[in-house]
Amino acid sequence: MTNENTDSTVPVLLTDVATAAQLIDICSKRGAFKAEELSVVGNLFTRLVAHLPTQPAEEANDEEVPQEQLEFNFSE
């Protein structure tokens, strides 16, 4: 693979952010992190969850909702 363009924009959906937060939650419950890593992991979890919209339980349903995108620029 050639490295012609080092800057790229990758769309990240809010569902991706939610999935990452859920993975952190599950892994922490299963003891996947060392004690000295917990504050870093917890801070990441808090930042991820801050980007998610809050939805009251009574409004939650299975209707398809348009997915919002966040854009991250990665460069080496």
Image (spheres, rainbow, N blue to C red):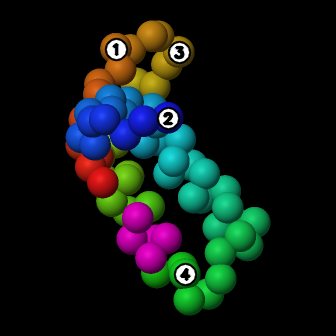
Mark 4 and mark 3: span between their CA atoms?
Answer: 36 Å
Which residue is tagged 3?
62
Q: Quadrant of the C terminus?
A: bottom left
- Please state the extent of the stretch shown in magenta in the rendering: 40-44
Mark 2 and mark 4: span between their CA atoms?
Answer: 34 Å
Kind of element beneath mark 4: helix
Mark 3 and mark 1: span between their CA atoms?
Answer: 12 Å
Number of marks drawn: 4
Frontmost of labels 1 and 2 is 2
Q: Look at 67% across and 61% down and name the residue there.
A: 27
* Picture coordinates of residue 6, whole percent (x, y): 28, 43
Which residue is tagged 4?
37
Kind of element beneath mark 3: loop
Nearer-the-camera pick, 55 or 76:
76
Q: Amino acid at mark 1?
A: Pro
Which residue is tagged 2?
1
Q: Earlier in the sequence, mark 2 or mark 4?
A: 2
Kind of element beneath mark 1: loop
Frontmost of labels 2 and 4 is 2
Which residue is tagged 1?
66
Frontmost of labels 3 and 1 is 1
Main SS class of the magenta portion in the image? helix
Q: Earlier in the sequence, mark 3 or mark 2?
A: 2
Mark 3 crowd level (few <14, some 14–19, many ≥20, 10 Å Cα): few
